[in-house]
Image: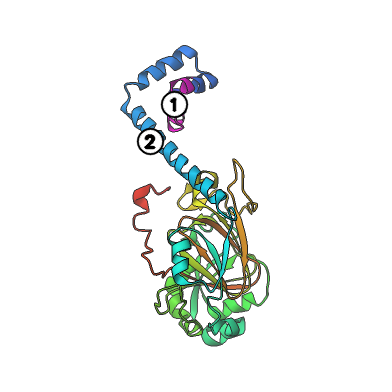
């Protein structure tokens, strides 16, 4: 075994929290002689990098203990690990028991007063903004990393052309007008804001939201957001799967805020040693889901779907600025 491979083994062992005996066993199991393994371990006693790795491993173990306790508390809660549903929630109760507690919820009755519930259709979109030029994510199906490589899939298209394509009612994940395109689309789709109204849970900021439109089959892979989000469904249905932040190790996070599970439809339930616990719900027209910052989620359109998402809560919600300082995963 080469020196590089030997050092990699040692680094893996230190990062995993191996004591000297466990590290010795790791090296011997990899084919290193007992004498050579002892020599390498004896050298570590004078290596400041090894000492730092061990301190960091101890800190990570402590964090793991804290997350395990959060899981235990969630499972021991009345009703167990479950997704609450509230109709016309009182803002004070919502903020106390969900926003501030970092706990998701399905919400109904929030937009019963929206004209959009009756007005929105492909015909309505075409009549009020069909000539506008919008931006969408396209050619997603050819790229397994379409969500991570969003900039490469941005295209401008006349809104009416996109609507004509959607009229085919074909299942596809190839084209999707998303929140990421809102920088261009906020002005282009401004007439649609006349069909909306303030939501009691949010700050009454005018025209402050993100429009989503796509066919049945659009799929946002497993990821967590860097803000708290309210996803409101207006046309069609979406299936939302969620996994808690305390299942971080089982979410296989190796890049930015995305999970290596990708589009895997992880089964609903308590999970096991390898898979996270997963909650699942379907939101239909007039329904919404609160997605707390750090909660993993996957969203699939079950029909032609139009949604609006909001981040304008009554609390500071800019968790992006200090994200990198806590060790953003590349």
Q: Which residue in the structure is indicated by mark 2?
A: 56
Helix, strand or loop at label 1? It is: helix
Q: Which one is nearer the viewer's eye here, 9 or 295?
A: 295
Q: Residue 24 location in percent, x, y?
A: 47, 19
- The span picked out in magenta is 10-24
Residue at 44 percent of width and 30 percent of height: 17
Q: Is residue 209 above or below residue 174?
A: below
Count of numbered tags = 2
Q: Nearer the viewer, residue 317 or 143?
A: 317
Packing grade of label 2 (10 A; few <14, some 14-19, many >=20) is some
User: Percent from the top left, x then y, of residue 72?
Assistant: 53, 45
Q: Which mark is residue 213?
A: none
Mark number displayed over residue 10: 1
Residue 20 x/y as whole percent: 43, 21
First in sequence: mark 2 or mark 1? Answer: 1
**SS at mark 2 in the image:** helix
């Amino acid at each position: 075994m080469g020196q590089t491979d030997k050092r990699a083994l040692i680094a893996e062992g230190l990062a995993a929290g191996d004591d000297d005996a466990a590290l010795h066993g790791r090296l011997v199991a990899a084919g290193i002689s007992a004498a050579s393994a002892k020599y390498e371990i004896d050298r570590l006693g004078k290596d400041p990098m090894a000492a730092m790795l061990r301190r960091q491993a101890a800190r990570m173990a402590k964090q793991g203990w804290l997350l395990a306790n959060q899981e235990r508390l969630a499972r021991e809660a009345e009703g167990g690990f479950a997704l609450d549903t509230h109709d016309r929630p009182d803002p004070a109760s919502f903020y106390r028991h969900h926003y501030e507690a970092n706990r998701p919820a399905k919400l109904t009755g929030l937009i019963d007063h929206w004209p959009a519930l009756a007005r929105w259709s492909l015909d309505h979109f075409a009549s009020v903004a069909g000539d506008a030029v919008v931006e969408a994510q396209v050619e997603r199906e050819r790229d397994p990393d379409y969500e991570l490589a969003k900039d490469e899939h941005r295209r401008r298209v006349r809104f009416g052309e996109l609507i004509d394509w959607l009229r085919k009612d074909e299942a596809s994940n190839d084209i999707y007008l998303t929140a990421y395109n809102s920088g261009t689309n906020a002005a282009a789709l401004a007439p649609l804001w006349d069909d909306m109204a303030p939501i009691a849970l949010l700050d009454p900021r005018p025209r402050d939201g993100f429009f989503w439109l796509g066919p049945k089959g659009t799929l946002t892979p497993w990821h967590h957001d860097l803000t708290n989000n309210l996803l409101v469904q207006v046309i069609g249905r979406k299936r939302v799967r969620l996994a808690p932040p305390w299942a971080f190790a089982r979410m296989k996070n190796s890049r930015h805020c995305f999970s290596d599970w990708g589009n895997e439809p992880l089964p609903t339930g308590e999970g096991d040693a390898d898979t996270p616990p997963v909650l699942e719900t379907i939101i239909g027209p007039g329904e919404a889901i609160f997605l707390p910052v750090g909660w993993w989620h996957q969203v699939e359109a079950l029909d032609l779907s139009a949604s609006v998402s909001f981040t304008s809560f009554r609390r500071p919600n800019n968790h992006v600025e200090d994200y990198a300082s806590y060790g953003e995963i590349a």
